[in-house]
Amino acid sequence: MSFEPIIGLEVHVQLNTNTKMFCSCSSKYLDVEPNTYVCNICLGLPGSLPSVNYEAVISAIKLGLSLNCRISNITKFDRKNYVYPDLMKGYQISQLDFPIAIEGNMKVKNIENKVTEIRINRVHMEEDVAKLIHDELSGEVLVDLNRSGMPLLEVVTEPDFRSAAEAENYLINLQSIVRYLEIGNANMEEGSFRCDANVSIREKGTDALNEKVEIKNMNRIKAVARAIEYEIERQTSQVKAGNRIIQETRGWDDIKSESKPQRSKEDAHDYRYFPEPDLPVIKLRTETIEKIKNELPELPEEKFDRYVNKIRISEYDARIIISNKNKTTFFEDVLTNFKKMDPNLVSNWLNVEINGVSNSLKDYELEKMKLSSKNFGKLINLVSENQINKNSGKEILSKIYISDEDPVELVNKMGLKSMNNKDELINMVNEVLKDNKSAIEDYRKGKENAVRFLIGQVMKKSRGTANPSDTEKEIIRQLNEQ
């Protein structure tokens, strides 16, 4: 008997509006004292009246349109009632039967690298809850209300995923879309992009939907993929052993790479939804929605298609560049300022050489890079026009990465301009050969490493300014004449 997984995802996207969802409290709650941004509306005190954050509504429309959703002309808020320590009011303002966006889709790659379509059930608006802090020493549970009331968009898919790889690709795409729209930073590590995965299995060839398990507490996209793979394997082994899958919520322990039971969900929770009495229905004009649609930026997949089919860089390079919005801006700025430059040369230096410097300078990751696109383009020009060799280019790059100095001036200052004087190269090779008689003997004995060694000596003597190809030719010429 063989099984297939049935997976659906629920993603909470925290928005980067200036204020919270239903009050004027600041949304900049990170790195401030607990319970700094709190008001009577956050707490749901008697007599307090919420009002809708206009910017959050616009953000919801943008995300819905970017996911090919139908935007509702009429949308409303509801009270979702439940009791939990992180919910001060005893209810959460959310959306039930009239969400702002429905019936969307996203195309993702599956494990066979084929495109499959994931249906988006809905995108709805709601408020975030407070943050619970568990003090292990005292055993106390502390509450920080700064996050309470933050604007969230929940993106709910249909159970269309059939592998962890599809889920991972979907999350990467969704994260990129949020960042390209500039409606949130989508950082899982700080909790502004949170994913719950619903996983079940069924016998291949059947249409049944069996008991599902909801997995929580995943703080990285790779962790979501690992959790799904673990849960598929766990459920498969349980069913093969004749055991029943219990519908429950499980937490993911990324250190131990296993899911653990948290609470049973055998009975459906009655949230006693009812329309939020303090907030009016929102009516959205079709022309307003169309205006927002026409002003959407070029999204990641559109950019990818243009990079590959029009700019003509490789799919591999294009995929790396579009994964980071700042990188796409940097890449396009170089091409705009240096119109005759080969885009493949730019993408190679951007994806390989800059990443190499970024990885070597741990305190200067890519987001802290000082290098401007203008000076980066100048540096690539120096290398492509053979004014400096590639090794000198890398040396210059490591310096201007954190200083943004003019590479042309730096080359002259450091004396790294490529040696174009043929007589100077002839004399330098002659001197190296005189100083390395043993290498000449090795060459005559047929040892290939001898020439590479001699090239290295010339490069060292010239401080890297000699052209490696010209140097090799001159070494072989002089060796054969001796």
Image: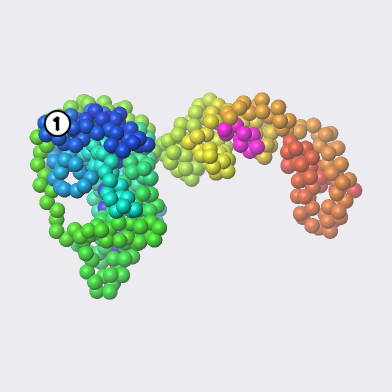
Rendering quarter of residue 474: top right
Q: Is residue 125 visible?
A: no
Image location of residue 479, percent across then percent down: 85, 48
Dominant SS type (magenta): helix
Look at the image and tell me in which quarter the N terminus lies: bottom left
Left or right: 121 with respect to 171? left
For image coordinates 33% across by 53% down, the residue present is 136
Residue furthest to the front: 138
Rendering quarter of residue 181: top left
The vertical placement of 262 against 237, above or below, is above
Q: Is residue 149 visible?
A: yes
Going by the numbered disc 1, the residue's amino acid type is Ser
* Neighbourhood count class around disc 1 (C-alpha, 10 Å): few under 14, some 14–19, many 20 upward: few
* Tag count: 1
Image location of residue 80, percent across then percent down: 15, 44
Rendering quarter of residue 88: top left
Image location of residue 310, percent across then percent down: 46, 35
For image coordinates 35% across by 57% down, the residue present is 253
For image coordinates 34% across by 47% down, the residue present is 170
Residue 139 shown in magenta: no
Residues 99 and 306: in front is 99
For image coordinates 43% across by 41% down, the residue present is 323
Image location of residue 144, percent across then percent down: 28, 41
Left or right: 457 with respect to 183? right
Magenta part of the chain: 393-402
- The scheme the figure's colours follow is rainbow
Left or right: 228 with respect to 313? left
Residue at the spot of label 1: 48
